[in-house]
Amino acid sequence: MTFPDGFLWGVAAAAYQVEGATSQDGRGPSVWDEFCARPGAVFDGHSGESACDHYHRYPEDIALIADLGANAYRLSISWPRVMARGVGPINEAGLDFYDRVIDALMSRGVTPWVTLFHWDLPSALFHRGGWLNRASVDWFGEYAEAIARRLGDRVQHWMTFNEPQIFLGLGHSTGEHAPGLRYSRPDVLRAAHHVLLAHGRAVERIREHAEVKPIIGWAPHGCICYPTQDREEDVAAARASMFGVPDGDGWCFSTAWFADPVVLGQYPEEGLRRFGTEMPPGFQEDLEQIAQPLEFFGVNVYQGRPIAAGEDGLPVERPRQPGFPHTMCHWPVEPKVLYWGPRFLQERYDLPIYVTENGCACMDWVHQDNHVHDAPRIDYLARHLSALRQAIRDGADVRGYFQWSILDNFEWAEGYRMRFGLIYVDFETMERIPKDSYAWYQQVILSNGGCLPEAPALLR
């Protein structure tokens, strides 16, 4: 059984994680450059200074994407590469790079899907208050307009933000990611509100200035909950938990707190009851601009939470059995997230769904035969894609899938020790070696998913 005709098969990467060349051709520093310079902030002192050297090796990488058979590549623009200080003069060398990348992709029949912000805030803007400063809405709007004016004659598919829950929660609440802050809840709420408002402003600017009629969405983190059993009460409990707004630091990672304003034009009542008095004054007046019409809902999915209904019917998270499988990132392997996640999201937001990231870190190395045999990744992807196909069969309007990632790359605070790629990168020589999973995914694309096994039981 195949995926629907026209299903989009893609791969993804992000600027800071693959480009390198952080101080070349007029690029300004980002918060991640500064964070990586802090002793102990990133594993083994790694940084994105060289990354995969995609800045110089993009023709080779694009050839590998095209040879894979992928019909879409999700990339991000480095804000400090095109505007060194975040606002003001355009760095033409930076925009010229993305011109070349877009043209090279399209010449090989690969559709570019452009993300405006994948965590690399220009340092100059951070030192002016970053997302705490309401002026960040104007800064992001100016940046979005510059990109739409330059690339909007060719680029049709756009995403504003990647995983706001993560760069706000880990970057501004727990301090594990750049810029490494531990704000109070009122400050994180204010920063989050400004990010959502900046999203709305960017959607407006893209629509105003892109020549090709744009198709716009975003790529939030998927905080997926799934029922432990195929019982109506467990399904209801999982749905309620997925769209709940927990107290404490957990609110930062809530799906509904971020998606409800963007799609439904309102913050969830549960969250407002808990900490509405800590919201920035007059936030209600911004909701109309935040809720700009979107063409799709993207979601990054890696793991989930098993939920059952307790005796009172309320959601209860169930523990996993000892020895439950985990990836190298210690994330549980739960294919059901790509069944229930898209279904729940479409029910609530009534938009076509694209899985904008999904993949796993494995213990990869070059074997004695000079190949990289990553059977666990193949199994992980096969299970998740089979679950996604079943979700589509059961009515979910899922139109595409982007595997994370095409290349092994800089995995944020984990540095280079976590390998997510279909292609192995030797970070000393920059040699690219397609893994077994590359050839496997090639066949998945060629067969439109027809080579995948049937989904495991208890998905419905």
Image (cartoon, rainbow, N blue to C red):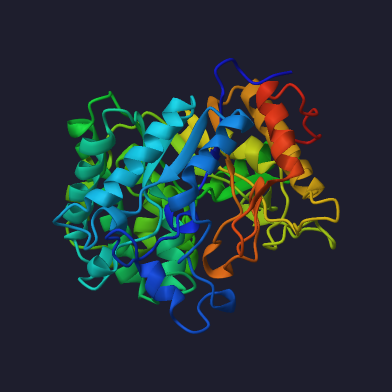
Q: Position of residue 7 (x, y in %)?
A: 56, 22
Q: Identify which residue is drawn at 33% across, 59% down.
A: 192
Where's the N terminus, which quadrant? top right
325 left or right of 332? right
Q: Residue furthest bottom?
A: 39
Please state which of residues 164 and 209 is positioned toward the viewer in this rendering: 209
249 left or right of 409? left
* Occupied quadrant, residue 435: top right
Please state which of residues 132 and 257 is positioned toward the viewer in this rendering: 132
**Above or below, comparing residue 79 to residue 212 in the picture:** below
Q: Can you see residue 195? A: yes
Where's the C terminus, which quadrant? top right
Q: Position of residue 3 (x, y in %)?
A: 65, 21
Q: Can you see residue 394? A: no
Q: Identify which residue is drawn at 32% across, 39% down.
A: 99
Q: Identify which residue is drawn at 65% across, 32% down.
A: 388
Q: Residue furthest left?
A: 88
Q: Position of residue 337 (x, y in %)?
A: 65, 43
* Occupied quadrant, residue 182: bottom left
Q: Position of residue 346 (x, y in %)?
A: 50, 31
